[in-house]
Each structure stands twice: as structure tokens, then as C-alpha cells.
């Protein structure tokens, strides 16, 4: 078992690096009295099959893209925070005797780890964070334990080091989303405690997250994403993969694209959102959602927000974590605005620098 920094509190700014199934997304933030500022930003696509089911399949290709995205961003930072998938991490709140030192807690957790972690201990990376004293029992403290297979952490660390970076923290995607949610809360139609859902549509994965009071209470992921739209464009119009992706972003496709290709994709996406809502209602104490945010590159599709809101009947908006941020002189404002809905995780990772 290896102790690793899921909950470390770094003292210097770090690059937020989101390694998704199809791209590497980089954000460097600074912070002052007025809020956050984007100092550097860049997104580069990954060669196909670099990532398979959120696991690194081609370490060399990934490290090359990471090195390129850092160079093109212009950032001079080396300390970096990346993340492992929430589905790969076991998080559990446990109770330990109060008064233990960090080393004593670590030893105690290792001793009792087989109660909480269903993997061989030599294959596990873990960390813990003391949350506070147990209610009505000051002799115990609540401790949040996070653990995953060591290879999930090690492969990311290797890729970052091969790219010339210093992997300071390996975070958990869910923690980063909670962090970034603070930046989009003011987009809510109402203030106060609300049940808020985020439908994040990536290239290959659709994740549906529900937060109450800024904390994730439900998370579900399915295989569905923008790649399916690109593949249908490629198939129907005889384009290469690159040409299909470019046409999807910039337009110029035949007149039947909207009705024959785009409309069925939107319909399928809305069905995924509807089913996710039903699963959430059936597995929780809630039977409503106050607000829905769309995230991921697909959320920028023309007319999607209005269609989702009309069919599902929930106030809907596109998540924009940069809405109130200042931009550095070297940051391309137009490109950043286009990529904003897909940058939620990268921003949440970069915000880790300031905790």
C-alpha cells in the first residue's frame, strides 16, 4: 500500500490538467482580491486509443501531447494536478481515535484497510483527511478515506514526469467538480440550497452528477458522447475523421444535416438526460431537480439548451466557469469561450492550488 496525496495542500500554484478520453485540457489560474484570472489555457486532441475506458493505453503518446499542450500554452509552471476517475476511487468516512498523529492514523488505516478496501493492499494508493470530531463523542474523529488501485495513480504520474512536469497532486474528479461548481453557482435562477444536476457530455462518456448544497450526492456515467455524432457525420458524408470533427464545429455540412443527423443525436442525448433523472429520483430521497447545467463540448450545439429545457421542463444553462474571470494577455478569449463548457474539470483541478 502506498500513501499518496489526494488531499495535499500545496503552497504554490499548479497547472490543472484534465486528461480525458479524447483530449488534454490545461488551465493555469492565479487569484487576487477580485477573484480568479486565467493565466494560460490550451486544449489538444489525443491520438485515438491513447486512453481506453479512462485508462492510459499509450503512455508515450500521452506524454508527448502533455508536453505539447504545456509548451503551446506558454505556462512556465511545472507543479501539476491531474485526476483519477471518481468511479475508480473508493471514498469512505471512517472513525478513528482523537489525538492520533498523522503517522499513527496512517498506520491505523493500513492495519484496518481490508475492512474498507476490496483490493490487495500492495496494489493500493490511499490518502485521508480529518473532517472533525464525531458528534456526541469527542474521543473520536471523522476521517475521509480515499483509495484506488496504485496503477491508476502511477500511470498518470509517469505520463506527467515523462512530459517534464512535477505531479504534485493526483485528485479525484468528483472533488474537482465540486470545486468548480462554486464558479457556476451564480448562474442559478434562484439562490439558496438547491438540487442541481450537471449533464457533462464528453467525446465518449456522458456523466450525470447531482449536487445539493454544493456537494455531490449522485453520480452516474454512461458510454455516450460527441464521438457518435462525429462518426455519423463521417459515415453519411464520406469525410475523414478530422474533416468530420472540423465540420461539426464550424458548419458547412449539407442541408439535411440538421434534420437527418443532428436532430436524432439531440434526441438521443435528451433521452440519456431523462433516464438519468429517473434513475436519480428512484435511488434518492428527491423527486425534483431545480436546475440543470450542460457541460462538455456537445453542450455548445445550437439550440440544445432550449430543446432540453422545453422537453425536460427544468431550467437549463450551459456551464461557464470563466464567466467572471479575468484573462491574461496571452489567452485567446474566443477560443476559451468556445471551450468553456468542456473545461469544468480542468478548472476545478487548477483551483486546488488555492485551498
Image: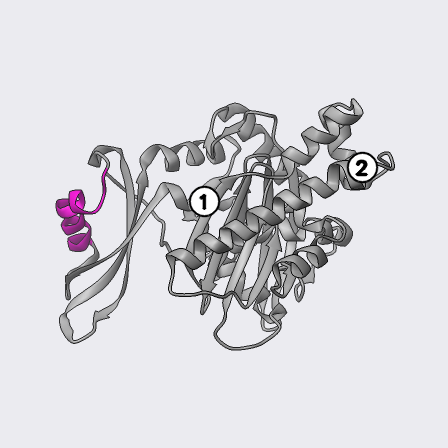
The reply to whether residue 353 is visible in this rendering is: no
Using the image, determine if residue 242 lies above or below residue 271: above
330 or 213: which is nearer to us? 213
Using the image, determine if residue 112 lies above or below residue 261: below
Instruction: Characterize the magenta stretch by its predominant secondary structure.
Output: helix
Q: Is residue 113 magenta?
A: yes
The N terminus: image quadrant: top left
**Residue at the spot 45% in from the left edge and 44% down from the top edge:** 83
The quadrant in which residue 298 appears is top right
Q: Which residues are magenta?
A: 103-118
Give the Cα distance between marks 2 and 1: 37 Å
The C terminus: image quadrant: bottom left
Residue 103 falls left or right of residue 277: left
Q: Which residue is mark 2?
A: 257
Q: Position of residue 318 (x, y in %)?
A: 66, 58
**Residue at the spot 49% in from the left edge and 26% down from the top edge:** 59
Q: Position of residue 168 (x, y in %)?
A: 43, 46
**Residue at the spot 83% in from the left edge and 40% down from the top edge:** 251
Residue 120 falls left or right of residue 169: left
Amino acid at each position: 500500500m502506498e500513501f499518496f496525496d489526494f488531499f495535499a495542500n500545496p503552497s504554490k500554484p499548479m497547472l490543472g490538467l484534465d486528461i480525458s478520453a479524447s483530449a488534454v485540457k490545461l488551465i493555469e489560474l492565479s487569484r487576487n482580491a477580485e477573484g480568479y484570472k486565467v493565466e494560460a489555457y490550451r486544449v489538444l486532441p489525443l491520438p485515438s486509443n491513447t486512453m481506453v475506458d479512462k485508462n492510459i493505453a499509450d503512455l508515450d503518446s500521452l506524454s508527448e501531447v502533455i508536453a505539447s499542450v504545456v509548451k503551446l500554452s506558454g505556462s512556465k509552471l511545472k507543479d501539476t494536478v491531474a485526476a483519477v476517475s471518481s468511479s475508480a476511487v473508493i471514498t469512505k468516512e471512517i472513525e478513528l481515535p482523537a489525538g492520533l498523529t498523522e503517522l499513527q492514523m496512517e498506520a491505523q488505516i493500513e492495519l484496518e484497510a481490508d475492512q474498507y478496501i476490496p483490493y490487495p493492499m500492495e496494489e493500493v494508493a490511499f490518502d485521508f483527511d480529518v473532517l472533525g470530531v464525531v458528534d456526541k463523542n469527542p474521543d473520536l474523529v471523522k476521517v475521509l478515506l480515499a483509495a484506488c488501485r496504485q496503477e491508476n495513480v502511477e500511470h498518470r504520474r509517469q505520463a506527467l514526469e515523462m512530459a517534464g512536469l512535477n505531479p504534485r497532486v493526483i485528485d479525484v474528479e468528483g472533488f474537482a467538480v465540486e470545486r468548480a461548481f462554486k464558479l457556476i453557482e451564480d448562474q442559478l435562477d434562484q439562490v439558496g440550497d438547491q438540487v442541481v444536476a450537471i449533464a457533462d457530455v464528453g467525446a465518449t462518456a456522458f456523466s450525470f452528477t447531482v449536487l445539493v448544497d454544493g456537494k455531490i450526492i449522485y453520480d452516474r456515467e454512461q458510454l455516450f458522447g460527441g464521438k457518435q455524432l462525429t462518426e455519423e457525420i463521417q459515415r453519411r458524408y464520406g469525410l475523414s475523421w478530422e474533416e468530420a470533427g472540423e465540420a461539426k464545429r464550424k458548419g458547412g455540412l449539407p442541408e439535411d444535416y440538421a434534420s437527418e443527423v443532428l436532430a436524432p443525436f439531440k434526441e438521443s442525448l435528451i433521452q440519456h438526460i431523462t433516464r438519468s433523472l429517473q434513475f436519480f429520483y428512484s435511488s434518492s430521497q428527491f423527486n425534483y431537480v431545480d436546475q440543470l447545467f450542460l457541460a462538455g463540448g456537445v453542450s455548445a450545439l445550437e439550440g440544445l439548451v432550449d430543446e432540453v429545457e422545453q422537453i425536460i421542463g427544468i431550467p437549463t444553462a450551459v456551464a461557464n466557469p470563466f464567466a467572471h474571470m479575468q484573462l491574461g494577455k496571452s489567452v485567446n478569449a474566443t477560443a476559451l469561450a468556445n471551450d468553456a463548457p468542456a473545461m469544468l474539470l480542468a478548472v476545478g483541478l487548477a483551483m486546488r492550488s488555492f485551498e
